[in-house]
Image (tube, grey):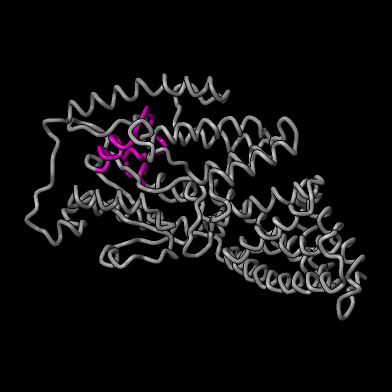
């Protein structure tokens, strides 16, 4: 598939998708959204089904600044789809450029919890329901039809969708007819230089991208695949390469300000770094923490993904006898993540670490231990409510699922939902155990066993509840009424 901008001759029509990539935080709601799933499940299949070439910025091969190619795409693409989810400032800016350049063939979409700025109220925005790290199968089917109908409309109807040309109806769109051949030649030169540039970066990092396809999207896919296969050292090299390419594409040669870095790529690099344990676990943990501190401004960050990752790293440093201060920092970061996202993952880890603190030198007095025990159980009570709501939503989705033979997409969704159900039930069981609600704990464990989870998942759960039981048996007598594990 060619990634060159469209020209005036006979060609396949082209759709340029304006949106972020990877997992990004929505700071208005505290959620994290997997934008790659939005692109892969909701957008790209529909565009290609209509016979258009579909491309996002991270899929374009280039060397140096991507701005030239991006502006050409915004002017010359037959259709632009702009996904404004997470209120991405780059997407909003690029949508404004498109509306200034072209009177029609622009489609605006977003996930349905985006608080629209006032100036977007008069723009038609098609919304979809994003569950954070997943998208419901029925929602995929529903939104694909809506997007397909929108594409049919913009390709066949002469309807102005740009507010610029709606209110300034005598405006003439700009054209580059006399410069098309020059622009095309420039892009071809960029493409030829891309492979040489990537070869230089590959030698510097030791990563091994696919020959002939050194795009950011490809590198991210390779990095995620390596981590799924527990090849964390390889993943670290790939994400280092991806970051260097991203910085080059941001126009670093033109301006020092352009040397920006992407939060998702840095978060994945930090995760791969501490999981790689190279040259040893403690060194990897400190290197990962430095990435978050120095390059993601950890001390002031309100990105839930960043602070949650910091909590996990600090917890591991404490467990590796690096000092009790790391336990306090882990509690601090998980607490920030919990109050930013109101989610079960950060909540249950926050509660657990408060119990760990009762067994450390940080809680020397019984009053300090009681304070942590009480607060931990208050968090667990809140987490139980989150688990019940999540399980009810999953049950409702299952009840609405089509009865026909599931296709590949539905099977993938069902597998993801089964894993999500396991972790939700594991969190629920841990919360019941900490609260001393042993009958509820046992019944939830029975549900977990019925799922026949993967061995590593079961072992992770068993290790956690075993440690929690030990902590509650040591200090649960301080509660009123005392904790009883039988």
Asked if 17 appears above or below 421 in the picture, the reply is above
Hey, which quadrant is residue 438 in on the image? bottom right
Above or below, 460 relative to 400: above
Camera-side residue of 92 and 142: 92
Residue 362 shown left or right of residue 118 in the figure: right
Percent of width and height locating residue 135 = 52, 56
Residue 261 pos. (x, y %): 47, 41
Q: Is residue 111 something one can see in this rendering?
A: yes
Which x, y percent locates residue 435? 81, 72
Q: In this view, does 420 lie to the left or right of 177?
A: right
| Residue nearest the viewer, comparing 426 with 320 | 320
Q: Nearer the viewer, residue 319 or 31?
A: 319
In the image shown, does 122 or 262 lie closer to the viewer?
262
The residue located at (55%, 46%) in the rendering is 408
Q: Quadrant of residue 287?
A: top right
Q: Give the quadrant of residue 248.
A: top left
Q: In this view, does 89 lie to the left or right of 211?
A: left
Q: Quadrant of the image for the N terminus?
A: top left
Image location (x, y in percent) of residue 401: 56, 61
Instruction: Specify the quadrant that holds the C terminus.
Output: bottom right
The reply, left or right, for residue 409 in relation to residue 452 is left
Q: Which residue is most to the left?
A: 170
Residue at 71% x, 31% y is: 278
Question: Which residues lie in the magenta part?
Answer: 47-74
Relative to residue 30, is residue 218 depicted above or below? above
| 90 part of magenta stretch | no
Identify which residue is drawn at 35% across, 47% down: 18
* Residue 415 in sight in this render: no
Is residue 54 covered in magenta? Answer: yes
The number of discs equals 0
């Amino acid at each position: 598939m060619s990634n060159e901008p469209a020209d005036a001759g006979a060609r396949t029509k082209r759709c340029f998708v304006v949106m972020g990539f990877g997992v990004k935080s929505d700071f208005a709601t505290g959620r994290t959204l997997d934008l790659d799933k939005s692109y892969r499940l909701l957008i790209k299949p529909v565009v290609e089904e209509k016979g258009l070439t579909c491309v996002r910025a991270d899929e374009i091969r280039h060397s140096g600044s991507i701005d030239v190619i991006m502006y050409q795409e915004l002017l010359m693409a037959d259709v632009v789809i702009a996904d404004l989810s997470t209120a991405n400032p780059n997407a909003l800016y690029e949508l404004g450029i498109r509306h200034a350049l072209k009177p029609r063939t622009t489609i605006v979409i977003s996930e349905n919890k985006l608080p629209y700025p006032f100036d977007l109220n008069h723009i038609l925005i098609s919304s979809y329901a994003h569950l954070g790290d997943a998208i419901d199968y029925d929602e995929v089917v529903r939104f694909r039809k809506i997007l397909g109908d929108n594409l049919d409309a913009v390709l066949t109807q002469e309807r102005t969708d740009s507010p610029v040309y709606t209110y300034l109806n005598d405006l003439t769109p700009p054209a580059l007819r006399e410069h098309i051949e020059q622009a095309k030649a420039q892009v071809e030169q960029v493409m030829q230089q891309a492979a040489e540039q990537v070869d230089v970066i590959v030698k510097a990092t030791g990563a091994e991208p696919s020959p002939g396809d050194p795009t950011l999207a490809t590198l991210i896919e390779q990095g995620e695949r390596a981590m799924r296969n527990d090849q964390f050292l390889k993943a670290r090299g790939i994400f280092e390469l991806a970051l260097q390419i991203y910085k080059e594409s941001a126009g670093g040669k033109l301006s020092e300000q352009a040397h920006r870095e992407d939060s998702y790529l840095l978060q994945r690099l930090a995760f791969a770094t501490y999981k790689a344990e190279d040259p040893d676990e403690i060194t990897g943990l400190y290197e990962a923490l430095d990435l978050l501190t120095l390059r993601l401004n950890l001390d002031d960050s309100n990105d839930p993904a960043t602070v949650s990752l910091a909590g996990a790293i600090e917890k591991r440093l404490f467990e590796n006898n690096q000092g009790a201060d790391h336990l306090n920092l882990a509690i601090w970061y998980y607490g920030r993540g919990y109050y930013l996202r109101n989610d079960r993952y950060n909540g249950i880890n926050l509660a657990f670490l408060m119990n760990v603190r009762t067994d450390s030198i940080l809680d020397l007095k019984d009053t300090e231990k009681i304070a942590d025990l009480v607060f931990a159980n208050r968090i667990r009570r809140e987490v139980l409510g989150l688990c019940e709501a999540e399980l009810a939503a999953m049950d409702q989705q299952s009840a609405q699922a089509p009865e026909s033979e599931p296709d590949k997409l539905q099977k993938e969704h069902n597998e993801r939902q089964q894993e999500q159900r396991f972790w939700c039930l594991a969190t629920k069981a841990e919360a019941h155990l900490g609260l001393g609600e042993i009958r509820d704990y046992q019944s939830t464990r029975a549900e977990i066993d019925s799922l026949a989870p993967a061995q590593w998942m079961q072992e992770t759960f068993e290790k956690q509840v075993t440690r929690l039981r030990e902590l509650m048996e040591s200090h649960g007598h301080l509660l009123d009424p005392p904790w009883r594990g039988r």
